[in-house]
Image: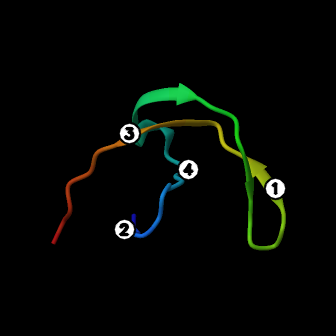
Amino acid sequence: WNADTGATSHMTPHRHWVHHYTPYCVPIKLADHTVVYSAGVGTVVFNPVM
């Protein structure tokens, strides 16, 4: 996962990474103008590997 510190939100296909998950459906417009919907929100905690 490359964390973009300038981003306000992130997306992941790995639901098992998300703690304190809450279902939350929001439309998200992609660069090609396609609309997809979020499944939920939560907190991801990770430890950097260097």
Give the foreground label among 1 and 2. 2
Q: Secondary structure at mark 1?
A: strand
Q: Which mark is residue 43?
A: 3
Horizontal arrangement in the rendering, residue 38 relative to residue 8 (left or right): right
Q: Residues within 10 Å of mark 1 (few under 14, many from 20)?
A: few
Q: Which residue is mark 4?
A: 13
Give the foreground label among 3 and 4. 3
Give the foreground label among 4 and 1. 1
Q: Amino acid at mark 3?
A: Thr
Q: Residue at x 52, y 26 (%)?
A: 22
Do the CB atoms of the residues marked 1 and 2 lie less than 8 Å apart? no
Q: Secondary structure at mark 2?
A: loop
Q: Earlier in the sequence, mark 2 or mark 3?
A: 2
**Where does residue 49 sit, x and y in percent of width and height?**
18, 65
Q: Earlier in the sequence, mark 4 or mark 1?
A: 4
Q: Quadrant of residue 40?
A: top right
Q: Amino acid at mark 1?
A: Val
Q: Earlier in the sequence, mark 1 or mark 2?
A: 2
Q: Residues within 10 Å of mark 2 (few under 14, many from 20)?
A: few
Horizontal arrangement in the rendering, residue 2 relative to residue 14 (left or right): left
Q: Which mark is residue 35?
A: 1
Q: Earlier in the sequence, mark 3 or mark 1?
A: 1
Q: Earlier in the sequence, mark 2 or mark 4?
A: 2
Q: Earlier in the sequence, mark 3 or mark 4?
A: 4
In front of the other: 48 or 38: 38
Q: Residue at x 40, y 42 (%)?
A: 17
**Where does residue 20 sit, x and y in percent of width and height?**
40, 27
Q: Quadrant of the C terminus?
A: bottom left
Q: Amino acid at mark 4?
A: Pro
Q: Which residue is mark 2?
A: 5
